[in-house]
Image (spheres, rainbow, N blue to C red):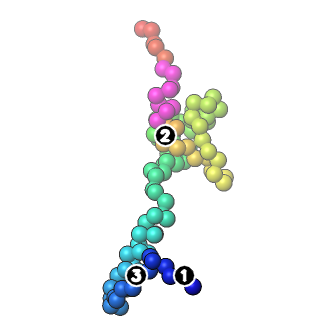
Amino acid sequence: MEANNNTMIVTLTIEQLHDLIRESVREELQDKQPVKEETAKLLTRLEACKALHVSLPTLSRYMDLGIVKGQKVGNRILISQENITNALTDLPTRKHNK
């Protein structure tokens, strides 16, 4: 049988062993936890209407034109806050001549 030169014998108290195990488990759990990324806030169509200051038919038209993009989740259509922000910057404006 071959002797392993990396073997170390250490005397620990029960409390020191518990602390060592706790710390090892804590480190492993931190490595395994997914990094929380900022999740996109999803708005209902009515919330999106309020954010854009438009009516529901206007929002539907914007969605048909591709100005606002929604995601179907179950029976609902949800719109991300990022899409609302993009729509606000991309909406064409009219110049009124007086």
Q: Position of residue 14 (x, y in %)?
A: 35, 91
Q: Residue at x 49, y 33 (%)?
A: 86
Quadrant of residue 30 in the image? Answer: bottom left
- The residue nearer to you, when weighing 47 against 40, is 40
Numbered range of the magenta stretch: 85-93
- Give the number of the disc on residue 82: 2
Give the alpha-carbon distance from disc 3 to disc 2, as whole Å.
56 Å
* Closer-to-camera residue (63/15): 15
Q: Is residue 3 above or below residue 47?
A: below
Amino acid type, label 2: Glu
Residue with the mark numbered 3: 8
Q: Is residue 88 magenta?
A: yes
Q: What amino acid is at disc 3?
A: Met
> Which residue does the image show at 46% across and 52% down from the upper left?
37
Q: Which residue is mark 1?
A: 2
Percent from the top left, x then y, of residue 48?
51, 41
- Say which residue appears at 46% left-offset and 14% top-offset: 95
Secondary structure type for disc 3: loop
Dominant secondary structure (helix, strand or loop) of the stretch shown in magenta: helix
